[in-house]
Image (tube, grey):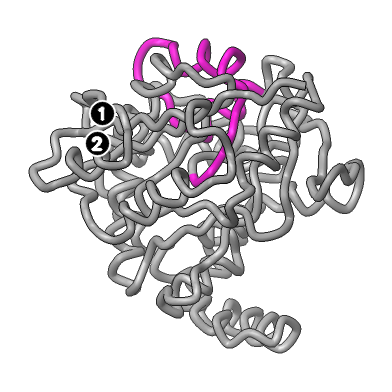
Amino acid sequence: MSRPTFTFVLPTLNASGALFERALSSIRAQDYPAELVEILVADGGSADDTRFAAERHGARVIENPNRLAEWGVKEGMLVARGDICVVFASDNELVGRDWLARVGDRFAREPDLAAAFGRLVSGPDDAPLNKYIELIQSEPLNWFLNRNLETYLEGPAVEQDGFAVFDVDPRRPLVWGANGLAVRTEWARPIWARDGYVADVDAFHAMVVSGRNRVAYHPGPFCYHHQVVRLSDLRRKWLRNSQQHLVHQAAARDLEWVHVPGFRRRALLWLVYSLVPPISAADAARRALRDRSVYWLYHPATTFLQAATYAQALLGSGAGRRLLSRSLLRRS
């Protein structure tokens, strides 16, 4: 059984620093033949040492004239040489030196496997807020709306070499994208090759809809995501994402993965849950006791902050209000 080749696609913009070095080093430190691993850094015009750092680690730097991360992933996907393409970020880090061996073996043994993903974890030196993000594995809104992964893991998933393997029903979508998402390049590339903007989560869902819906999930530590230190970091991230990737790109995106069964009801419940802090605080206290984790106590503040940030982005422009209206008035 031959080993698959890998391409890591990292979109960057002024990413030079310790985290970027750790991301690249975690790839190069793998117990896997180096000649089977390609790193593509899709740079949006960095003015710091990002390109030099990438080249020191043997990465190939390509241009990302549109600057946004999703465009960088697209540029990388179009020229990736590996059998498996991994969507990575400058604040990611692989867990363990056998990551490529484990993921590669899973794809080699399962010819129908389209994608592999796993649990995102916080590093031991990360800020407490990042440890809360590890608990919810996403952002508060997606955590509240979409619990489909739990349903798959409790139901049809089959354990294979530490991975839970199952088929995704497009009507029960998953919020998978970036942060170590590995996809079979020949099946994923045609989706990223479509004209215009392609978000990673949209592309994953489109692959599922096309019938390439066999996936593997690793429930143990899979990829570090060293993303935030302060609440202000989250606010800036959510404001940027909601404006640049949601409102401004809404016409180009297929957001069916958002509209899970009962979406309208869940969205309205989210407004109450997030904007009435005693409700989210009571839930956070219950979960903190259950999980014996004080990091749940960040939950009321983050849910309120995200609701306020999204309200600013959606209600502050005509395009945002139209998107909100279409989403809430759709049948669910």
Give residue 55's mark.
Answer: 2
Q: Tell me whether circle 1 and circle 2 mark residues in contact (CB < 8 Å).
A: yes
Residue in view at x 41 percent, y 15 percent? 78
Q: Position of residue 229 (x, y in %)?
A: 34, 72
Which quadrant would the C terminus be assigned to in this image? top right
* Front-lying residue, 36 or 99: 36
Instruction: Looking at the image, tell me whether mark 1 or mark 2 is earlier in sequence order.
Output: 2
The disc labelled 2 sits on which kind of residue? Glu
* Front-lying residue, 1 or 255: 1
The disc labelled 1 sits on which kind of residue? Val
Q: Nearer the viewer, mark 1 or mark 2?
A: 2
Q: Position of residue 306 (x, y in %)?
A: 41, 63
Query: Separation of disc 1 and disc 2 at Cα?
Result: 7 Å
Residue in view at x 53 percent, y 26 percent? 36
Residue in view at x 25 percent, y 24 percent? 62
Q: With 131 as the anchor, is 22 left or right in this view? A: left
Q: Secondary structure at mark 2?
A: helix
Which quadrant would the N terminus be assigned to in this image? top right
Q: Which residue is mark 1?
A: 61
Q: Which residues lie in the magenta part?
A: 179-207
Q: Is residue 21 above or below residue 169?
A: below
Q: Position of residue 120 (x, y in %)?
A: 58, 57
- Please say whether residue 11 is visible from this viewpoint: yes
Find residue 312 and report its image quarter.
Answer: bottom left
Tell whether position 196 is magenta: yes
* Local crowd size for mark 1, using a 10 Å CA cut-off: few (<14), some (14–19), many (≥20): many
Q: Position of residue 17 (x, y in %)?
A: 23, 57
Q: With 168 as the anchor, is 80 left or right in this view? A: left
